[in-house]
Image (cartoon, rainbow, N blue to C red):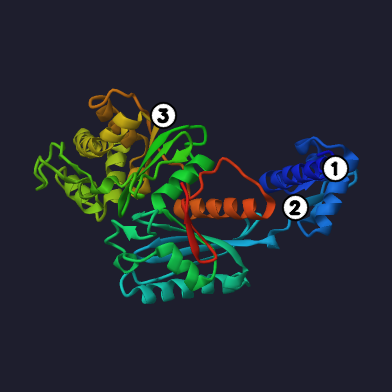
């Protein structure tokens, strides 16, 4: 035991140093000393060893003026590479990054959502290979790929289901076939789950133990986090609230019976446009309609326009709250988060109205907020997931990041929860 202790201690110190450099780097030797609590000689030896092993590199100097400039150290990005991919009916949005998290290239390409499995996989492979080429890499250089997709992946079969907008991807082992086609270990995750993951890392839910996220955009979706873990369910369908039948509690008549319809239809962009039109607000899509209403409420000097905007958003809030109420009653989360173009367009005004509707329907007094994430949050969540997988494999680093459940290791899919 004693003979192994110095080696074990060295491994622990190495991981602590690598973790600090990935999290806060580049760092000087003295900054690293402070971060990991080692002496000056021990830190110098550690850096020399990691540099010789090709794990860290010297990266410029810090300082200036009259004093000496200090050497900066960073994790060598080329140790491993990952791909993060947002798959939608319009195509793929791909980011290639090194193990430090530096994005080497971004690539968007159309991939037809229809066709045979071979056809959609071929298009997917071509797009990923093109992204690698732009980064000066090949598919063989990728250590792991995380793909975010609409719909749910059955953890037992790997099949995509409840995704009529991606018919070409249904009916086969999606992570298994992608991994075989690309020759790279693959993880598949629901796109909204990845946004929830990103919210925990860099968004409004960094301190929340539990929250419910509602995605209002082209498509409608949800994610549930309990004790910092994504709830996926036995078949991968947890959070698929768009298929839930709910009544329509809106005051305006838009042709939808009071008995209601699918929640995904009720708050879809076309039906939000119809609801806005009932109050004299014309728009081409749901998020534009909501943005106009918010502007009327906050900026208009005309009382009638303010009333129109308020009435429209109140009706929309009733629809959203009706779909969310059941989840809030069961989970009692710390927070409800609005995401997607329509949700973000509503901002604090729509959050306030949804919160008021929820208070009239359920016992929990859950605050409603909107996401502050910028850019493609699906791809960002996929990137963090891919980096977590590879950093654990390469460096033995583990964090509190919720890991996607659908993996492929060398073309052998392993489902975990």
Foreground residue, 312 or 385? 385
Pointer 1 and pointer 3: residues touching (CB < 8 Å)? no
Report the front residue among 321 and 280. 321
In the depicted structure, whether residue 47 falls above or below residue 316: below
Q: Which of the pair 280/415 is nearer the observer?
A: 415
How many residues crowd around disc 2 within 10 Å: few (fewer than 14), some, or many (20 or more)? many
Kindly indicate the quadrant of the structure image that contains residue 5: top right
Report how far apart the C-alphas of labels 1 and 3 lie in the structure: 48 Å
- Locate residue 41 relative to residue 404 in the image: left or right: right
Residue drawn 36% across the image and 39% down it = 347
Numbered disc 1: secondary structure: loop
- Nearer the observer: mark 1 or 3; the answer is 1
Q: Specify whether 405 is left or right of 312.
A: right
Q: Secondary structure at mark 2?
A: strand
> Residue beneath label 2, please?
74
- Residue 23 found in image quarter: top right
Structural crowding at the residue carrying mark 1, measured as other residues with C-alpha within 10 Å and reported as few (<14), some (14–19) or many (≥20)? few
Of tags 1 and 2, which is closer to the observer?
1
Q: Quadrant of residue 336?
A: top left
Q: Is residue 24 above or below residue 328?
A: below
Q: Are marks 1 and 2 in contact (CB under 8 Å)?
A: no
State the image coordinates of residue 105 (x, y, percent, origin top left).
57, 65
Can you tell which mark lies on residue 3?
1
For marks 1 and 3 on the same chain, the one whose residue lies earlier in the sequence: 1
Left or right: residue 155 versus residue 59 is left
Residue at the disc numbered 3: 334
Alpha carbon separation for disc pair 2 and 3: 37 Å
* Residue shown at 84% from the left, 38% from the top: 2
> Mark 2 or 3 closer to N-term?
2
Alpha-carbon neighbours of circle 3 within 10 Å: few (<14), some, or many (≥20)?
Answer: many
* Disc 3 element: loop
Q: Position of residue 121 (x, y in %)?
A: 41, 72
């Amino acid at each position: 035991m004693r003979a192994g202790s110095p080696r074990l201690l060295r491994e622990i110190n190495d991981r602590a140093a690598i973790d600090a450099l990935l999290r806060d780097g580049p760092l000087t030797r003295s900054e690293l000393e402070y971060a990991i609590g080692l002496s000056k000689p021990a830190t110098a030896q550690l850096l020399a060893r990691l540099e010789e092993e090709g794990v860290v590199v010297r990266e410029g100097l810090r300082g200036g003026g009259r004093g000496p400039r200090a050497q900066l150290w960073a994790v060598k990005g080329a140790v491993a590479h990952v791909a993060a991919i947002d798959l939608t009916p319009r195509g793929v949005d791909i980011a290639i990054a090194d193990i430090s998290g530096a994005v080497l290239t971004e690539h968007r390409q159309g991939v037809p959502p229809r066709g045979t499995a071979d056809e959609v996989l071929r298009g997917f492979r071509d797009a990923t290979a093109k992204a690698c080429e732009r980064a000066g890499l090949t598919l063989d250089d990728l250590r792991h790929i995380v793909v975010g997709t609409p719909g749910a992946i059955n953890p037992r079969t790997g099949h995509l289901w409840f995704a009529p907008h991606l018919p070409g991807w249904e009916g086969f082992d999606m992570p298994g076939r992608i991994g075989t086609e690309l020759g790279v270990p693959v993880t598949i995750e629901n796109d909204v789950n990845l946004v929830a993951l990103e919210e925990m890392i860099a968004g409004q839910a960094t301190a929340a133990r539990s929250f419910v996220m509602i995605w209002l955009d082209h498509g409608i979706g949800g994610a549930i986090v309990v004790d910092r873990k994504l709830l996926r369910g036995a078949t991968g369908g947890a959070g698929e609230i768009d298929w839930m039948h709910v009544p329509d509690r809106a005051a305006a008549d838009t042709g939808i019976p009071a008995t209601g319809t699918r929640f995904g239809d009720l708050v879809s962009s076309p039906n939000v446009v119809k609801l806005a039109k009932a109050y004299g607000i014309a728009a081409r899509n749901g998020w534009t309609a909501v943005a106009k209403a918010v502007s009327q409420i906050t900026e208009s000097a005309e009382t009638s326009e303010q009333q129109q905007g308020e009435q429209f958003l109140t009706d929309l809030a009733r629809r959203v709250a009706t779909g969310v109420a059941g989840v809030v009653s069961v989970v009692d989360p710390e927070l409800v988060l609005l995401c997607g173009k329509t949700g973000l367009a509503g901002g604090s005004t729509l959050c306030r109205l949804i919160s008021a509707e929820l208070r009239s329907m359920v016992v929990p007094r859950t605050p409603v907020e909107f996401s502050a994430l910028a850019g493609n949050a699906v791809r960002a969540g996929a990137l963090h997931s891919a980096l977590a997988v590879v950093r654990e494999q390469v460096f033995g680093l583990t964090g509190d990041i919720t890991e996607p459940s659908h993996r492929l290791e060398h073309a052998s899919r392993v489902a975990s929860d």
